Image (cartoon, rainbow, N blue to C red):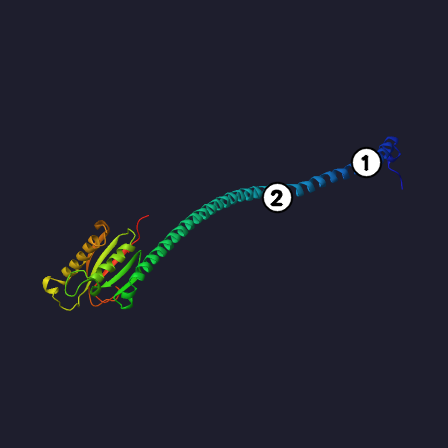
Amino acid sequence: MGKNPWEEDPDVAALAASMRAKSPKRWLRLFIGLLVVAGATFVAAYYIPLHRAHDKLRDEFQQLSERRRVLDESLASKERELKKLEAEKVTLQGKVDERDAADESKRKLLEELRVAISSKLRALETKRLAASALAGERVRISLSNRVVFSPNTLTISKQGSSALCDIAGASRGGQLRVVSVTSGNEAPSVLAAKYASRRELSGARAAVVTNALEESCKVAGARMEPVGWLEDGDAKAWGTALPAIVIELALPPK
């Protein structure tokens, strides 16, 4: 086969040899370029999502930090409120204990007063002609009318005067409430004929006892309150059979 005319041309042969010499360098540059592009693509594909995830985590962290700050402030506020409530509870409990102690002390004093009077009226209590009890913040002493008055009169008997003065002497300056308790079922008597009603008779009895306490037992009138009381039926809550004189004593002021 014949050769092409340019194959024998020296210039063409020199150019071909030059291109064969430069061909490996061109491929190397192409390979390096591909590596750069691949690296940039990898960096872009990896870094951008990572950057976005980092921003998201940072925002979430800031939100959580703010939430924690709010919760810490709320907790601190609740702790302050709790301490305040505990302090108020301690103060209130102290007042309750103080009041209970005062009530207990008063109850003991009232019981001592009741026992002191009861010891003086023991003979009458044995015969159920007198009775003593605590009634709230007072000592209640009940005396049968048979003890206080002479029969069918409003005259204080000797025994009645002695009992009334024993009660007055133990009162230690406290207030006395003198209650004449008359039963609605009280049998008719000479006295009933002198008064328009049993209520008036009851009031008259209370007034006579109050005067006796003031005159014979030297109890100041300002310390006494006479009361006429008409009781339906034969109530036994007063401690003795009705009619009766009931004296309620309060402790003297401190």
Asked whether 149 or 86 is in front, the reply is: 149
Residue 31, given in percent of the width and then of the height, sits at: 77, 39
Is residue 133 something that shows in the picture?
Answer: no
Residue 153, given in percent of the width and then of the height, sits at: 14, 63
- Relative horizontal placement of residue 147, taking residue 103 as reference (left or right): left
- Relative horizontal placement of residue 133, taking residue 46 as reference (left or right): left
Rendered view: 76 above or below 103: above
Asked whether 36 or 181 is in front, the reply is: 181
User: Spatial distance from mark 1 to mark 2, Cα to Cα?
Assistant: 42 Å
Residue 44, given in percent of the width and then of the height, sits at: 66, 40
Asked whether 164 or 40 is in front, the reply is: 164
Q: Quadrant of residue 143?
A: bottom left
Q: Residue at x 27, y 60 (%)?
A: 141
- Give, as a three-letter code, the residue at label 1: Lys
Mark 2 lies on residue: 53
Q: Secondary structure at mark 2?
A: helix
Asked whether 16 or 58 is in front, the reply is: 58
Which of disc 2 and disc 1 is earlier in sequence?
A: 1
Rendered view: 237 above or below 218: below
Q: Which mark is residue 25?
A: 1
Label 1: few (<14), some or many (≥20) within 10 Å? few
Q: Residue at x 29, y 68 (%)?
A: 126
Is residue 58 something that shows in the picture?
Answer: yes
- Give, as a three-letter code, the residue at label 2: Ala
Q: Quadrant of residue 135?
A: bottom left
Q: Secondary structure at mark 1?
A: helix
Q: Nearer the viewer, mark 1 or mark 2?
A: 2
Residue 9, given in percent of the width and then of the height, sits at: 87, 32
- Relative horizontal placement of residue 173, taking residue 97 as reference (left or right): left
- Relative horizontal placement of residue 129, taking residue 62 as reference (left or right): left
Label 2: few (<14), some or many (≥20) within 10 Å? few
